[in-house]
Amino acid sequence: MIKTDSLIAPILKNLGIEEGVRLAQVKNNWHKIFAKPLSQHMFPSKLSGHELLLNVDSPIWLQQLGYYKREITQKLESYGVKDVRFRLGRISQKKQTESHTHKTAELSSEDAFFIEDVVSGIGDETIKESARRAIGKSLTSIKHPR
């Protein structure tokens, strides 16, 4: 059997949406990657290559997080992040939700937003719709393995 990752990665790269997908994955899993209070005071803003830009909500946290840059980077390595930068900025109010544990196969509004964010860079409508369906199916199967 061939892993799905090995098939999808080249397609995402050819479509030019690989970074967008990785950033959306980091955002979607943010509260799983970092516990409170870290997850409440920093949030991913932009991914350029292997560098992730993190918005931080106050100068005090900005200074404090600088001391933990190496540990933060290590936690993000599985998403292809090799370096992080911090800047003062607005933090998303997205909270950890229970939607990942519900026994329903419907997509949440967060999932729909995630899908639209990922496919927004695809120009061809046929490919865009196929990607929407594939990602939607993937998200519901991840939440509810058979």
Image (cartoon, rainbow, N blue to C red):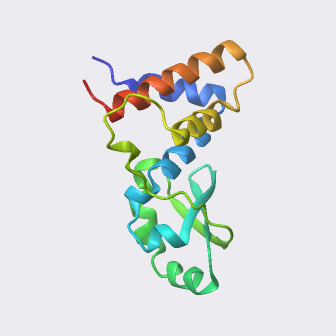
Give the camera-side residue of 107 and 67: 107
Furthest residue toward top: 126
Q: Position of residue 18 (x, y in %)?
A: 58, 36
Relative to residue 5, is residue 41 depicted above or below? below
Quarter that holds the C terminus = top left
Relative to residue 136, is residue 44 depicted above or below? below
Instruction: Please state if 102 lies on the left or on the right of 91 as rendered.
Output: left
Q: Position of residue 101 (x, y in %)?
A: 32, 43
Residue ID at (58%, 16%): 130
The quadrant where residue 143 appears: top left
Relative to residue 140, is residue 97 depicted above or below? below
Quarter that holds the N terminus = top left
Furthest residue toward left: 146
Q: Is residue 42 visible?
A: yes
Residue ID at (40%, 71%): 36
Q: Position of residue 125 (x, y in %)?
A: 71, 16
Q: Position of residue 128 (x, y in %)?
A: 65, 21
Residue ID at (60%, 61%): 92
Count up the numbered dots: 0
Q: Is residue 5 visible?
A: no
The quadrant where residue 70 appears: bottom left
The quadrant where residue 76 appears: bottom left
